[in-house]
Amino acid sequence: MAALGKSSLLCRCLISSKAIRGSKQLSQDAAIRQGLVGMVGRTPLVRLNKLSDETGCEILAKAEFCNGGGSVKDRAALFLIRDAEHKGLIKPGGTVVEGTAGNTGIGLAHICLALGYKCVIYMPNNQSQEKIDCLRTLGAEVRSVPVVPFTDPDNYNHQADRFAQSLENAVWTNQFDNTANKRAHIETTGPEIWQQTGGKVNAVVFGTGTGGTLAGVGTYLKEQNPNIQVFLADPQGSVLYSYIKHGKLERSEGSSIAEGIGQGRVTNNLKDAPIDDAMVIQDTDAVAMTFRLLHEEGLFVGASTGLNVSAAEQVAKLMGPGHTIVTCLCDTGQRYYAKLFSRQVLAERGLLDCIPEAYRRSLHD
């Protein structure tokens, strides 16, 4: 694990070492954020009041939409770029290329603007229009390509790799297999959770796409207390539940409305992650929780967050009252408005009935 403190250039970019060590005196770096880059990390930890009261557990969530680019992926984006700079793979004015379902690309586009890089994003063509529009507004060139498996040479990740190789002064940041992604969470998210809970955390639960958040947070927290339980929350149609439970890469039934999570393989970021257990969260539960969070907690979030919190509720019931479970509010619901909050789309997917009638007033036609 990368050490915290002055020896870590990446850590210094993101976190005040005094804040991580629990100092009562706020440092200047913690009090005043240094530009957009300084707005990555140190997000609030929010108690989900109704769910906590219902389960008798403290269900807490990192409000990752408070990052500068609006999602948990901002952490990985910054570390991926800093890693490329540190290795001499990109020079001022160069081009950052990535294959992404959206949020990592948005984080990269924000940071490229702040640091003076160009940004090119390859994206599967089943992602929300809101994310594509956001990327283009941020100045990124977006190349939307057909959805094919990772084993296909035309998978969006392989196309991003080839394009970066065709340019001078360009880097493919490779979020899935570049472990700078995981290191972001070893050096930032994990320590923040440990400090914000005063070390009183019993379990963490995250959905995973690249695996960076789950693996990084789990690695750090297990080193502080090996009794902390790490749970993987898998959407329907992913292989990771089967892999964790049975050692086989077999897909669960269906496909998910949640974007950016679920996998068909084990990434380098996920390899050797200290995962204790896994669960499949059905779309009906993820969507129902998304609307509960909106109407009962006032939190406007996407389906990946609904999945995370639904899984955290299940973990709370599994562990019993008196435990502290931490998860993640990945991003905002605005990025999925056209699909996730559409009455027609939800009805077509058989998801409308899982939303209480009183909560359907949030839907558009």
Image: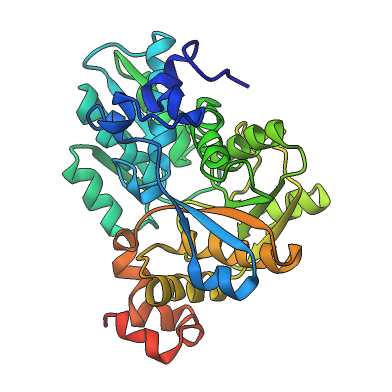
Q: Please, is residue 18 above or below residue 146 in the view?
A: above
Front-most of residues 1 and 334: 1
Residue 162 visible in the current orientation: no
The residue lying at 38 percent from left, 84 percent from top is 359
- The location of residue 2, given as percent across then percent down, is 58, 19
Q: Please, is residue 330 above or below residue 110 in the view?
A: below
Query: Quarter holding the N terminus?
Result: top right
State the image quarter where residue 114 is shown: top left
Residue 92 visible in the current orientation: yes
State the image quarter where residue 333 is shown: bottom left
- The location of residue 296, given as percent across then percent down, is 42, 76
Q: How is the image coloured?
A: rainbow
- The location of residue 280, given as percent across then percent down, is 67, 63
The residue lying at 22 percent from left, 29 percent from top is 35
Q: Say left or right for 213 vs 112.
A: right
Q: Say left or right for 271 vs 132.
A: right
- The location of residue 34, given as percent across then percent down, is 25, 27
| Residue farthest along the right direction in this orientation | 246
Query: Quarter holding the C terminus?
Result: bottom left
State the image quarter where residue 163 is shown: top left
The residue lying at 53 percent from left, 69 percent from top is 286
